[in-house]
Image (cartoon, helix red, strand yellow):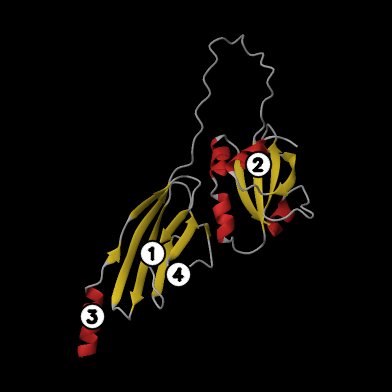
Amino acid sequence: MKLLLSALLFLAASAGFAADHTIPAGRFADLKYKVECGDIVKVRVTPAPPQKADGLDPGRFLFAGEAGKTYSVRGYIINFKTEKFEDVDDTVTFGEKAVPPPNPKNPDPKVTDSKEPVSPKLYFVVVRPDGPATPAFIMLMQNPGWTQLRAEGHTVKDFTVSEAVASLPVELGATPLPAVVTLAVAKDGKSHHLYRTPSAAPTTAEEILRLKNPN
């Protein structure tokens, strides 16, 4: 009876985590809780995120979410050695997608003879090995360069090798993974063609933005 009462007091006296997090559009939630060796961690993200990293250190949760959607991160962390029980009850809200500013109307309809070429809308596909996305790949996709491309109206997606082979009109060959395939979207939006030769995925924002230039 004394042991049961002690356990109840230990649980009742515990502290907890409770916070609201707002994540900008195109970024990943990266939550870290203090966990000591031997702790029992039982934390769940609901609803299930569309993408999450596996193999992380205990107490770390790295995941992506749909724009404008809120996720609950709930559970507990127990350390029996120190008789410590931490309740986890957080919320994570992902921001809405960035909307490019509207083009100003031309006050003079006669001034329309511009010789500058119109940049096509591009479709960037970052191809990774089959299986769950690694933490390194998720951090790569979090680069601000991809966010900038989305803000400019381009599309950025990630495919596994199997998905890429089944749906893309190009062969990767010996291109190292992760690789990036750049397609140009037709004006009608119903078809696309290869814009650049597939290459290893860039790792800096400057290199990512250069993908807008044809080979």
Q: Which residue is mark 2?
A: 123
Choose mark 3 or mark 1, whichever is in front.
Answer: 1
Dividing the picture into quadrants, the one containing residue 79 is bottom left
Residue highlighted by disc 3: 8
Q: Residues within 10 Å of mark 3 (few under 14, many from 20)?
A: few
Q: Is 71 on the left or on the right of 81, as rendered? A: right
Of marks 1 and 2, the one in the foreground: 1
Marks 1 and 2, how far apart at CA: 37 Å
Q: Give the labeled residue for mark 1.
A: 33
Marks 4,1: beta carbons within 8 A: no
The quadrant in which the N terminus is found is bottom left
The image quadrant of residue 208 is top right
Looking at marks 4 and 1 on the same chain, the residue that comes earlier in the sequence is marked by: 1
User: How far across and how far down the image is residue 106, in percent?
Assistant: 55, 15
**Callout in the foreground (4, 2):** 4
In what element is the residue under mark 3? helix
Pointers 1 and 2 in contact (C-beta within 8 Å): no
Name the kind of residue labelled 2 in the image.
Tyr
Q: Earlier in the sequence, mark 2 or mark 3?
A: 3
Q: Is 185 displayed left or right of 7 in the figure? A: right
- Cα–Cα gap, marks 4 and 2: 36 Å
Looking at numbered disc 4 in the image, what kind of residue is underneath it? Answer: Pro
